[in-house]
Amino acid sequence: MQRRNLLLAAAAAGLPAAASMLNIAARGAKGDGRTLNTKAIQAAIDACAQGGGGTVFFPPGRYLSGTLVLRSHVRLHLDAGAVLLGSTNLADYPATVPGFRSYTDVYVNRSLLYAENVQDIAIEGRGVIDGQGARYPHGPYLVRPYLLRMIGCRDVGVCDVTMRDSPMWVQHYLNCDNVAIRGITVHSRVNENNDGIDIDCCARVRIADCDISSGDDAIVLKSTADRVCRDVVITNCVLSSACNALKLGTETNGGFENISVANCAIYDTRLSGIGLHIVDGGTMDRILVSNLAIHGIGAPVFIRLGNRARPFVEGGPRPGIGKLRNVQIRGIEATGASRIGCSITGLPGHDVENVTIENIRAVFAGGGTAADAARPIPEKPEGYPEHHMFGVLPSYGFFVRHARNVRFRDMEISYADREERPGFVCEDVERLSLDDVRIAAPAGEAASLVLRDVRDGVVRACRPSGRVARYARVEGARTADLVFRGNDFRLARQAVETAPETPAQGVLQAENLAP
């Protein structure tokens, strides 16, 4: 009956039926939590592979082990009540240098579960993989093993298991194809760098129905070599992180293409809800994000094109400035965002391109001052990309700089405490559109919207939420073809204020409701 249930579970997961099943207890493994079972479990894995493949079964018990090397056509099934317990002795994790080289060589050469250049493998069941990460020192990378590392593998399935308390990253998939991760639980906040899931230089990846609480980024896509990370779907996940919930970056050498994120709940996350970064060359292209419910966050959205320009191998050439384009973010309800605000920033001469943000309602902490609004924001081209990298932004909602073809539609932003900053500040933007955007009016003399050196822009069907000294302030000698059309300015003392250096012919108003 047990074998039949395993076969049915494999079929439901879309995995091939196992040809045989080996019980690790029958191979001498002891589930007492003290006996080191590395040799017994590895012997079961090897025997299963030599027999043509099948399932290695972990019955209830606590099985202490060092590194286990996975083989092609072998599935590990951890039954309910089974715990694969990582040894706390670093000597039980032999160092391994993979054939596929990437920047992660700096981070790791040890893991509890390891696979390289194998296919048709799976880890499944209602059991637990526990790395006992609290018993490792904090600090240096290479003395803390990962729970799971797969490199150059194909047809990988990870289903239903719980992973907890990793000494380092929880799971790392590098240069893999056709990866399905479904219904897993990750809880790892006991050490540093506890990323929940790292997808790195992979193709055709599906992540669904996962519950992740991590001390570092919850789900992060990386490109730590010159291979594009592409064709990835993330859906129906619940995420909490001491860093970012969903991130593309920080390593970006190969870039990212065709990424879709949908239907996720994010809570108690210190940094950004969705972070999109290109800083080590590479191109980010065709990114879709939709339907996020967020509470307790640093910033709902953070988008950054920078120039850290770090090679992915020692002595390699420094990459040039990459590209970040074709991003759509739709359907976000966010409360409890910090006072810093969201930002979309490129570099002078290197714009973020084609970004659409729509159907968003976000409540920020507020508390910004007039001094915050007037503070110059440095470029920081080489800075590490985090939402707080510029400090408190000059706008409480969105700060946009060095961008082209940016659209905000059907949005409402507000704040909790007194706020003296504009809701939006857009600087050096070509082809900007604000359509049906409601901005909670700031206090004092601040405008709801500041546009500086905006070319070919339109503000349409917008109105302030509450009385405001002026709705918009337009600045910059390069302002051109900026149109305010069909807006409701009745709650503004002044509709549009134009700075002295702004060309009079650069701003056009038509069909607005006057103050």
Image (spheres, rainbow, N blue to C red):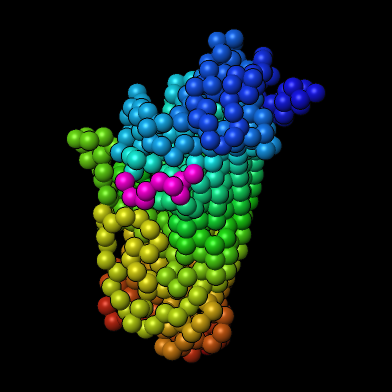
Against 313, is 153 above or below? above
Residue 187 vs residue 470, the one in the foreground: 187
Q: Quadrant of residue 74?
A: top right
**In what quadrant of the picture does the N terminus appear?**
top right
Point out the residue furthest to the top here.
51
Residue 356: image location, x then y, percent: 50, 56
- In the image, the segment drawn in magenta is 132-140
Tell me which residue sits at (53%, 17%) in the image: 43
Q: How many marks?
A: 0
Task: Look at the image and tell me whether residue 449 can be seen.
Answer: no
Q: Residue at x 37, y 72 (%)?
A: 392
**Residue 198 magenta-drawn?**
no
Identify the main secondary structure in magenta. loop
Q: Is residue 139 magenta?
A: yes
Q: Is residue 506 left or right of residue 436?
A: left
**Could you say which quadrant of the image residue 185 lies in?**
top right
Residue 457 image offset from top left, x and y in percent? 43, 65
Counting from the top left corner in percent of width and height, residue 169 is at: 44, 43
Residue at image location 56% in from the left, 13% down from the top: 47
